Image (cartoon, helix red, strand yellow):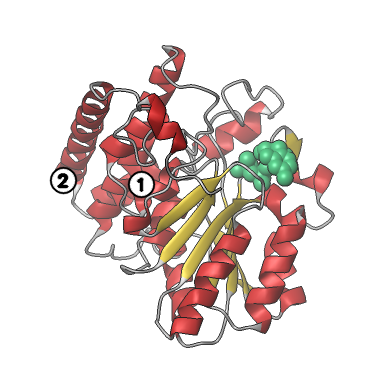
């Protein structure tokens, strides 16, 4: 297993697209602020699982992908779908249950998909989407294209059978898959230590003969760099990689969880390492304070405009319930 150096790059010269990474993370953060507001107004049906605090994982990984690559994710997937390039307004529309939503308003918060940008679907079943990524990688391999498929999933998912089956199959067939554990330290209300007998989840890669990489998941540039290595390996036909991103969710598991079970000191120490603040600080230190402020402003405006537009869309027609189904 390789330990990716923690924070190797945020202090170094920043990449040319640092402001784009910042914009993408701000959009996800503000998008979910608004989702929380809409939820409080009873405009979001069911629950919703926020990824605030984990934005560097999805933005870093997706910034290392190319058009044609695909991605699957969990119910905590707003950030992953937006990071792939799904439009803000249609993502709002989906969560609001509006006809203009990504899935016609029929999927909601836990079922976002936008195949046009390679977002093959978020999934409410823990581990349920890993076989989808293996399938997408198999399809690419069978067709002889260079596409890779990424699966994002939680620490808790590494105890699910589908995790083990998917890693095994992807490795034995050397498929172009990248498995990304969003280790936010908890599965619902349980600490990792209370459900999992090992500390480093990336160690599990050894059982499947693939590299296991442990990365600071709050460092967007470290996440991208680890993903680039995995993408090169996948495109070269050398098979999958398991990446463990060390991170933290800012709020509870879902909207019914006030997250009181987390020690105050732990919460404080993770908030002090907020991924957005870390990148912003690095940009400011390299002379980009005004540009960073402008990115924050426009991200806010864009999110607000997308929300307002989606709120004007109607709910789907009743007849839409009979579309897009198999019989
Ligand atoms: C197969 C299955 N078992 C149980 C659940 C209930 N459940 C929903 S989320 C969750 C915790 C998953 O934790 P983790 O994989 O760490 O993801 P996180 O929510 O922390 O992002 C559980 C047990 C489920 N949705 N699917
Ligand atoms: Mg978790």
Q: Nearer the viewer, residue 297 or 321?
A: 321
Q: Which mark is residue 175?
A: none
Q: Nearer the viewer, residue 223 or 66?
A: 66
Q: Which mark is residue 291?
A: 2
Residue 327 placement (x, y as % from top left)? 56, 48
Ligand 1 neighbours mark 2 (CB distance < 8 Å): no
Q: Residue at x 43, y 23 (%)?
A: 36
Q: Nearer the viewer, residue 92 or 52?
A: 92
| Residue furthest out toward the top | 41
Residue 37 placement (x, y as % from top left)? 39, 18
Image quarter of the N terminus: bottom right
Q: Residues within 10 Å of mark 2 (few under 14, many from 20)?
A: few
Q: Indicate left or right for 179 with 66 as reference.
A: right
Compared to residue 221, the image places residue 290 above or below, namely above
Compared to residue 87, the image places residue 138 above or below, namely below
Mark 2, secondary structure of its residue: helix
Q: Is residue 58 visible?
A: yes
Q: Indicate left or right for 170 with 309 as reference.
A: right
Residue behind mark 1: 82
Q: Is residue 1 visible?
A: no
Image quadrant in which you'd find residue 254: top right
Q: Nearer the viewer, residue 147 or 192?
A: 147
Q: Residue at x 80, y 58 (%)?
A: 198
Image quadrant in which you'd find residue 266: top right
| Residue furthest out toward the front | 327
Image quadrant in which you'd find residue 100: top left
């Amino acid at each position: 297993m390789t330990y990716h150096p923690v924070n190797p790059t945020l202090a170094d010269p920043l990449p040319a697209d640092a402001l784009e990474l910042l914009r993408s993370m701000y959009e996800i953060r503000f998008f979910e602020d608004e989702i929380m507001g809409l939820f409080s107004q009873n405009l979001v049906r069911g629950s919703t699982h926020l990824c605030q605090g984990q934005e560097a994982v999805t933005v870093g990984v997706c910034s290392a992908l190319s058009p044609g690559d695909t991605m699957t994710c969990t119910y905590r997937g707003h950030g992953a779908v937006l990071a792939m390039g799904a439009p803000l307004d249609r993502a709002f529309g989906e969560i609001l249950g509006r006809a203009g939503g990504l899935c016609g308003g029929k999927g909601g918060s836990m079922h976002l998909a936008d195949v046009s940008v390679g977002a093959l679907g978020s999934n409410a079943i823990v581990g349920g989407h890993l076989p989808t990524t293996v399938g997408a990688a198999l399809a690419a391999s069978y067709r002889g294209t260079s596409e890779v498929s990424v699966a994002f999933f939680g620490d808790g998912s590494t105890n699910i059978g589908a995790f083990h089956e998917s890693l095994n199959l992807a490795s034995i067939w050397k498929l172009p898959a990248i498995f990304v554990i969003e280790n936010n330290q908890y599965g619902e209300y349980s600490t990792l230590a209370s459900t999992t007998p090992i500390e480093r989840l990336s160690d599990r890669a050894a059982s499947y003969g693939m590299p296991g990489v442990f990365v600071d998941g709050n460092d967007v540039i470290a996440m991208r760099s680890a993903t680039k290595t995995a993408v090169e390996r996948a495109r070269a036909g050398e098979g999958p990689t398991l990446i463990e991103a060390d991170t933290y969710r800012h709020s509870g598991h879902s909207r019914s969880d006030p997250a009181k079970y987390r020690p105050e000191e732990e919460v404080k120490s993770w908030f002090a390492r907020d991924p957005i603040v870390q990148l912003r600080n690095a940009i400011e230190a390299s002379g980009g304070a005004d540009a960073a402020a402008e990115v924050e402003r426009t991200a806010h405006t864009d999110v607000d405009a997308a929300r307002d537009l989606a709120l004007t869309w109607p709910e789907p027609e009743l007849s839409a319930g009979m579309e897009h189904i198999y019989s």
